[in-house]
Image (cartoon, rainbow, N blue to C red):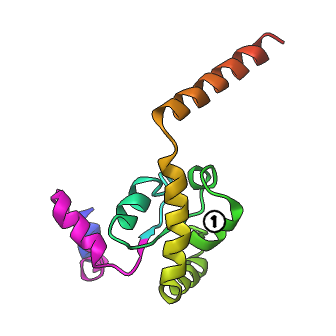
Amino acid sequence: MEEYIWNKKLHLDVLSIPHLPAVTHAAFYACAKLTIAPTLFEGGFPFVFSESLSVNVPALLSDIPVVQEMLTMEQREAICFDPYDVDDMVRSIAWGIEHHTELLNIEYDIYEEMKKRTWDTVASEYIDVFKSTIAGAGK
């Protein structure tokens, strides 16, 4: 990987800083205008999302199933981009920079809803899935 980065001169554009202390990590977030989570896997939800909001920086997320599961269509239109479409990502970033306060307000509303989700809620959801699976298996 290191050879690839040097051969493609990515070291001039991308910095990898492993093992960052928590305070420094938060400071990096605080220095940003936006946090971008261009992933096909974890979606940045809830960790990147909440870490970014903790220092008043909004986050833009890939519109992937794990994010779709948590957000309404209206919320996704504001904070998500198609991770397979660079132009859509660029449009989202430009919109996020121009509408920084609006984006923060949308995300704070989402965060307030997230805080209501407890381990009891999660456990109940798992139990419901198990009950549904067992009931379906009996047919």
Q: Is residue 12 part of the magenta span, yes or no?
A: yes
Pointer 1: residues within 10 angstroms few (<14), some, or many (20+)? some
Q: Where is residue 76 in the image (x, y as percent from the top left)?
A: 63, 65
Residue 122 sits above or below residue 65 on the image: above
Judged from this view, the residue extending furthest toward the right is 139
Residue 90 sits above or below residue 134 on the image: below
Q: Where is residue 115 in the image (x, y as percent from the top left)?
A: 47, 49
Q: Where is residue 72 in the image (x, y as percent from the top left)?
A: 67, 58
Please state the total of marks drawn on the protein image: 1
Q: Position of residue 129 (x, y in %)?
A: 65, 26
- Where on the picture, by quarter, is residue 71? bottom right
- Where on the picture, by quarter, is residue 22? bottom left
Residue 20 placement, left or right of 35: left
Residue for badge 1: 75
Give 101 or 138, whichever is nearer the viewer.
101
Q: Residue at x 17, y 66 (%)?
A: 24
Judged from this view, the residue extending furthest toward the bottom is 98
Residue 99 placement, left or right of 35: right
Q: Which residue is drawn at 30% across and 71% down?
A: 29
Amino acid under disc 1: Gln
Span shown in magenta: 8-35
Give 94 or 1, whichever is nearer the viewer.
94
Q: Residue at x 24, y 77 (%)?
A: 11
Report if residue 102 is visible in the image: yes
Report if residue 40 is visible in the image: no
Judged from this view, the residue extending furthest toward the top is 138
Q: Quadrant of the C terminus?
A: top right
